[in-house]
Image: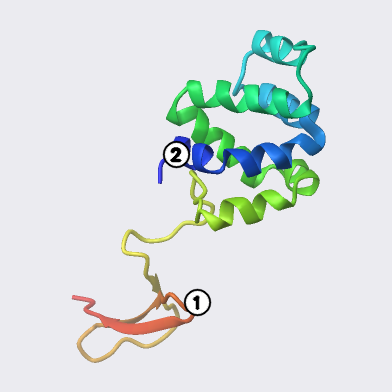
Amino acid sequence: MAANAILISNKTPIVETLCADYTLILNKAVQNKLITQREYKNLKSINKLNAEGHVVELLDRIMDKGEKTCLAFLNLLQTDEEIQQTYPELNNILKKENCPLPYPVQACSVDNTVEATGGPSSENGSRDTARPSAGGTAQYTMVDGG
């Protein structure tokens, strides 16, 4: 699912969660260059809005900037330690969507296999490899080494 679509479909719970400390998310957004300093000042100075209004305006501004900014915002929500400590409910909201991190956090091969090292090869040069299954356990298969 596209980052913009994830934000749209989860806008209400994200807004409700971020309202707990909306100044933190505004500060993080400007620190990570998701919004400009001018946008930050404009969002912060909207007097007629409560915390929810500020967060809604921030999310709308981020979504208006396009997919790349939405992806960077989701990455920020999932990887920033202070955000995770302040808004622990975000993990449940984003996991519900199977929201993947936009940047890899661990290297893996193209076919998602992990070669076992240190084990003997068979007579024909094939090696044991482990492929993670849906249940989290590894399935071993022989891969032709030639």
Q: Report the quarter where the C terminus lies.
A: bottom left
Disc 2 is placed on an element classified as: helix
In the picture as drawn, the residue positioned furthest to the front comes out as 48
Q: Is residue 75 left or right of residue 19?
A: left
- Classify 10 Å Cα crowding around label 2: few (below 14), some (14-19), many (20 and above): few
| CA distance for labels 1 and 2 | 28 Å
**Residue 67, percent from left and from top:** 44, 30
Q: Nearer the viewer, residue 14 or 36?
A: 14
Upstream in sequence: badge 1 or badge 2 = 2
Looking at the rendered structure, the kind of residue marked 1 is: Gly
Q: Is residue 77 left or right of residue 127?
A: right
Q: Which residue is mark 2?
A: 5
Residue at image position (79%, 27%) is 23
| Proximity of marks 1 and 2: CB atoms separated by less than 8 Å | no
Which numbered dot is residue 70? none
Q: Nearer the viewer, residue 116 or 111?
A: 111
Nearest to viewer (mark 1 / mark 2):
2
Which numbered dot is residue 136? 1
- Classify 10 Å Cα crowding around label 1: few (below 14), some (14-19), many (20 and above): few
**Residue 12, percent from left and from top:** 62, 40
Residue at image position (46%, 39%) is 3
Q: Taking the image as drawn, is residue 96 in sight?
A: yes
**Residue 42, percent from left and from top:** 70, 9
Q: Taking the image as drawn, is residue 32 in sight?
A: no
